[in-house]
Amino acid sequence: MLSPTDAFESVPSRTLNRRRLLACLAALPFLAATAPAAAASRGLQRLQPRPSAPKLRLTALDGKIYDLGAQQGRVVVVNFWSVYCGACKAEMPALDALARQHPEVAVWGVAAGDSPETVAAFAETVAVGFPLLPDPQMHAASAWSVPVLPVTDVIDPQGRIALRMIGEAHWDQPPLRDQVLALIAG
């Protein structure tokens, strides 16, 4: 006989929750080792020399494919976030304002560790004009060496990482907005 709690959970849901819990537990030693270094380096970093951005090709909720390689000549803001990250959700309005006020800048939200279903449910609760790109297995976050969330990388028109922000930021206000827009001019 099912308990009242079990009646609201399906077997696949419990299995998924157990897998997520095990994955989180497995990541704890790594996070504990890297958290002090990440916290010490929070804030804006100007990368010199500018490294080439890793490949990034993800599918949005609407099925459209977003490929960073096809964005040569354009500034792209790649924000790594999660539905479960409060700071990530807090900075979304500023990223959305940047995207709306400056359509010449592409803003992409990479949902690190979140399933397409979880991102879709979240998207129904928040109005953003930039694509939310699920990265459920965190392949992109790993390739981009994302130590914590949120992390935002700003890619210059030559496809190189010019700026990295670790932590929440006001992307729609100076000085960050101005630094992003300066990359357009070169």
Image (tube, grey):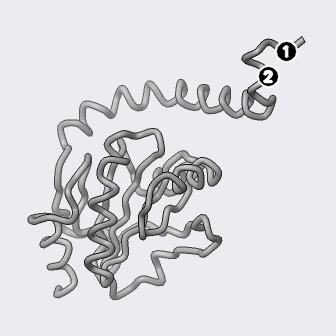
Q: Tell which of 19 and 160 is nearer to you.
A: 19
Q: Seen in the image, is 173 located left or right of residue 129?
A: left
Q: Tell which of 97 and 23 is nearer to you.
A: 97
Question: Which residue is drawn at the image coordinates 65% and 51% (left, top)?
Answer: 117
Mark 2 Cα shell of 10 Å, populated few (<14), some (14-19), many (≥20): few
Place of residue 11 in the rendered image (x, y in percent of width and height, measured from the top left): 81, 29
Mark 2 and mark 1 in contact (Cβ < 8 Å)? Answer: yes
Q: Is residue 9 above or below residue 90?
A: above
Question: Which residue is drawn at the image coordinates 34% and 56% (left, top)?
Answer: 92
Q: Is residue 69 above or below residue 121?
A: below
Q: Seen in the image, is 71 located left or right of residue 135?
A: left
Return the disc, 1 or 2, that comes first in the chain's sequence: 1
Place of residue 107 in the rendered image (x, y in percent of width and height, measured from the top left): 37, 70
Tag 2: residue type? Ala
Q: Tell which of 70 and 16 is nearer to you.
A: 16
Local SS, label 2 = helix
Place of residue 14 in the rendered image (x, y in percent of width and height, measured from the top left): 73, 27
CA distance for labels 1 and 2: 6 Å
Place of residue 59 in the rendered image (x, y in percent of width and height, measured from the top left): 60, 67
Tag 1: residue type? Leu
Where residue 12 sits, quadrant-wise, is top right
Query: Where does the C terminus fall, quadrant-wise?
Result: bottom left
Question: Which residue is drawn at the image coordinates 75% and 27% (left, top)?
Answer: 9
Residue pointed to by mark 2: 7
Where residue 147 sits, quadrant-wise, is top left
> In the drawing, what numbered circle is on residue 2?
1
Q: Is residue 67 above or below residue 134?
A: below
